[in-house]
Image (cartoon, grey):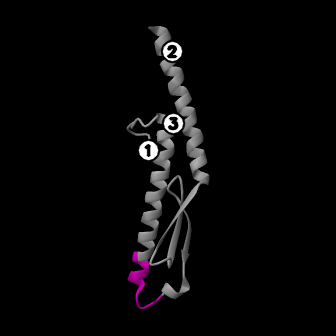
Amino acid sequence: MAKGLGNIMKQAQQMQQKMARMQEELQSREVEASAGGGMVTATVNGAQQLVNLKVEPSVVDPEDVEMLQDLVLAAVNEAIKKSQAMAQEEMSKITGGMNIPGLM
């Protein structure tokens, strides 16, 4: 029984190490999403951090700031969704598809 528990602990430790490496790798991977036909483009890394935001000058209208705000929100939120999906996909490779609460 003790040997079985030791194997489980060892496997858990290995999974934890793989997850730490994966999280480091995800910080260097990026996804991009745009809104308004490419007028606003957001780039987010695998840690769900906004790393770049591009706004086409033609969409900047002092008379319609709300539209620009909406486009920025839409692009950033879509990029975050893509980043989360990428992280979930990578996590499932480590966990074998098991959904372990609190990991992601």
- In the figure, residue 1 lies in which quadrant? top left
Camera-near label (3 vs 2) is 3
Query: In 3D space, how far apart are the residues under numbered discs 3 and 1 (Cα atoms)?
Result: 12 Å
> Was residue 67 drawn as part of the magenta stretch in this picture?
yes
Which residue is most to the top? 1
Camera-near label (3 vs 1) is 3
Disc 3 residue crowd, few under 14, some 14–19, many 20+, Cα 10 Å: some
Expressed as whole percent of the image width and height from the top left, the position of residue 12 reads: 50, 26
Expressed as whole percent of the image width and height from the top left, the position of residue 53 reads: 54, 71
Mark 3 or 2, nearer chain start: 2
What residue would you read off at disc 1? 104
What residue would you read off at disc 2? 6
Task: Give the residue type that dot 2 points to.
Answer: Gly
Secondary element at image label 1: loop
Mark 2 or 1, nearer chain start: 2
Which SS does the magenta portion mostly show? helix
Residue 94, relative to residue 65: is it above or below? above
- Residue at 43% of width from left, 58% of height from top? 81
Mark 3 and 2 residues: CB-CB less than 8 Å, in contact?
Answer: no
Secondary element at image label 2: helix
Magenta part of the chain: 61-70
- In the figure, residue 99 lies in which quadrant? top left
Query: In 3D space, how far apart are the residues under numbered discs 2 and 1 (Cα atoms)?
Result: 26 Å
Residue 4, relative to residue 57: is it above or below? above
Q: Which mark is residue 94?
A: 3
Query: In 3D space, how far apart are the residues under numbered discs 3 and 2 (Cα atoms)?
Result: 20 Å
- In the figure, residue 74 lies in which quadrant? bottom left
